[in-house]
Image: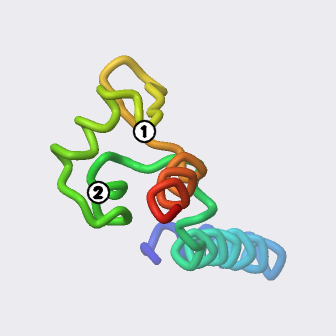
């Protein structure tokens, strides 16, 4: 904590100290929760992640997308994502 923050907190009394600690604890809790969240909480993944999940190369993933065998989405113009549901569907289709 910087000296400016410390003097501000000291001038404000116990309520200010508790508010500062509360805000910091909330930030730590949010960061911890995000770090511990499983990958399945994500709706779609990058091509590189999809390649790792399917044990394929990125080139092969892009080829499957071009062939229409693997569906992908473009959340922004230069971004390509593969929904996790699509990866699961592809895995199940290959095993049959």
Counting from the top left corner in percent of width and height, residue 93 is at: 52, 54
Residue 58, compared with residue 4, is above or below; it is above
For residue 51, the mark is: 2
Residue 76, compared with residue 8, is above or below; it is above
Q: Residue at x 77, y 71 (%)?
A: 19
Residue 11 in sight from this viewpoint: no
Q: Residue at x 18, y 55 (%)?
A: 57
**Residue 37 as seen in the image, left or right of residue 19:** left
Q: How many marks?
A: 2
For label 1, the SS is loop
Q: Residues within 10 Å of mark 1 (few under 14, many from 20)?
A: some
**Residue 19 as seen in the image, left or right of residue 88:** right
What is the basis of the colouring in this image? rainbow
Q: Residue furthest right?
A: 15
Q: Which residue is mark 1?
A: 70
Q: Residue at x 83, y 75 (%)?
A: 15
Counting from the top left corner in percent of width and height, residue 2 is at: 43, 73
Residue 26 falls in image quadrant: bottom right
For label 2, the SS is helix
C-alpha distance separating marks 2 and 1: 12 Å
Are discs 2 and 1 less than 8 Å apart at CB? no
Residue 84, compared with residue 64, is above or below; it is below
């Amino acid at each position: 904590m910087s000296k400016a923050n410390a003097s501000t907190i000291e001038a404000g009394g116990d309520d200010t100290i508790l508010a500062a600690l509360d805000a910091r604890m909330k930030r730590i809790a949010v960061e911890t929760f995000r770090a511990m969240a499983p990958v399945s909480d994500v709706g779609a993944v990058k091509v590189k992640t999809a390649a790792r999940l399917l044990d394929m190369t990125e080139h092969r993933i892009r080829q499957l997308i071009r062939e229409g065998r693997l569906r992908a989405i473009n959340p922004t113009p230069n971004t390509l994502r593969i929904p996790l549901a699509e990866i699961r569907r592809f895995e199940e289709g290959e095993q049959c």
